[in-house]
Amino acid sequence: MRPFEDMRAALLAAATPLSTVEQVPTAEALGRVLAVDQISSLDVPPLDNSSMDGYALRCADLPAAGARLVVAQRIPAGSVGHSLAPGTAARIFTGAPIPHGADAVVMQELCSLDGDGVLIDHLPRPGEWIRRAGEDIARGAVVLTAGQRLGPQMLGLAASVGCATLPVFRRLRVALFSTGDELVMPGEPLPPGAIYNSNRYVLRGLLEALGCQVCDLGIVPDSLEATRAALRAAAGSNDLIITSGGVSVGEEDHVKPAVQAEGQLDLWLVAMKPGKPVAFGRVNDPAGGNGADFIGLPGNPVSSFVTFLMLVRPFILRRMGVEDCLPHSIRLPAGFDWPRPDRRREFLRARVGEAGQVELFPNQGPGVLSSTVWAAGLVDNPAGHAIAQGEPVSFIPYSELLS
């Protein structure tokens, strides 16, 4: 078996980033991967402006608190005032440009109206409550870097510097199918010995959450020829083929020999728990095209889920052009004992309790899909490492894995 770290490194080394770039409206770029650095053509904010509703004035015109200034102009947001004459103030609103000559803003709560003037009950410092031009973004600054997966806040930042469209890599095309004569779809009768196909829903959901274009080929019968036919059908129009089930060495496990017949198998078996049987290779395009990468996942629901999160997700993100593609963990105290660790690297379904300690789901079996719903993340435990209650463990929250 290949160590987990080696398997992941090998997958990332084989993950060739997409090269096709599309220009899409900024409002439609959520979840896409930026292909080119975005540079601001303007300062943000473009002018010095007020960060409070109040009065813009000259500090030199206030000998003491309680001084009176004539209100000579009113400047709402979206308009520009005129130069501030000595001894006067400008009624100003949040976001409005500071008039020439003013060097501070006093918030309205510290002022009181007096006829056509205002009494200033506070001695401001120069620059008080003024947001300077370029304070957020300077003209010529890189606001977004290539290789970032665009979140809502990034779209807002792009819009703030006037980007109506963004250059992004095209979506990764992924074909998905399950193998197993025991599988039936929800809504169909459940014969003796059959199970409903949950992996199809989990894996499709994970792929779509990553922004992939999914070709769902459903369930493929347990035969070598049917599996080879499915691989051939998928290889011509997809970048990646993902399967669940059939990658072990049983008489009804046909995925491994099918991939070897239709392409090549480069990696197989990883020292992680759950999820030992994971296969990686290439499937040739029968029409002579580039073909598709192949990843075969275990059939057990939790094994399929965990191996996708820890191995397939980084591979897909790297292929999409994402630079920072590995999940980040946090160190938290264990609220449990784990005295009998496995010789493989373990990923334990867990969540953080009210006391701030990590709690484990009682049944860590590879078929207990309910544990993935109860949990809020995974404990990443090194191979052969026993855990004592109170010891710090590496916890990877779902927020790092499910989007």
Image: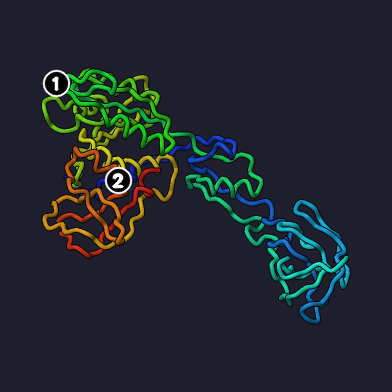
Of callouts 1 and 2, which one flags the residue occurring earlier in the amino acid sequence?
A: 1
Residue annotated with mark 1: 192
Residue 354: image quadrant is: bottom left
Q: Is residue 266 visible?
A: no
Residue in the picture at 26% in, 51% down? 350
Residue in the picture at 54% in, 48% down? 154
Please tell me which residue lies in front, 96 or 169: 96
Residue in the picture at 40% in, 43% down? 403
Residue in the picture at 24% in, 38% down? 369
Question: What is the x, y in percent for residue 145?
Answer: 53, 50
Q: How is the image coloured?
A: rainbow
Residue 16: image quadrant is: top left
Residue type for callout 2: Met
Identify the residue at the far bottom of this view: 63
The secondary element bearing badge 1 is classed as loop
Question: What is the x, y in percent for residue 92?
Answer: 77, 60
Tell me the distance, in whole angstroms, between the alpha carbons under discs 1 and 2: 34 Å
Local packing at callout 2 (Cα closer than 10 Å; few below 14, some 14-19, many 20+) is some
Q: Is residue 145 left or right of residue 180?
A: right
Residue annotated with mark 2: 310
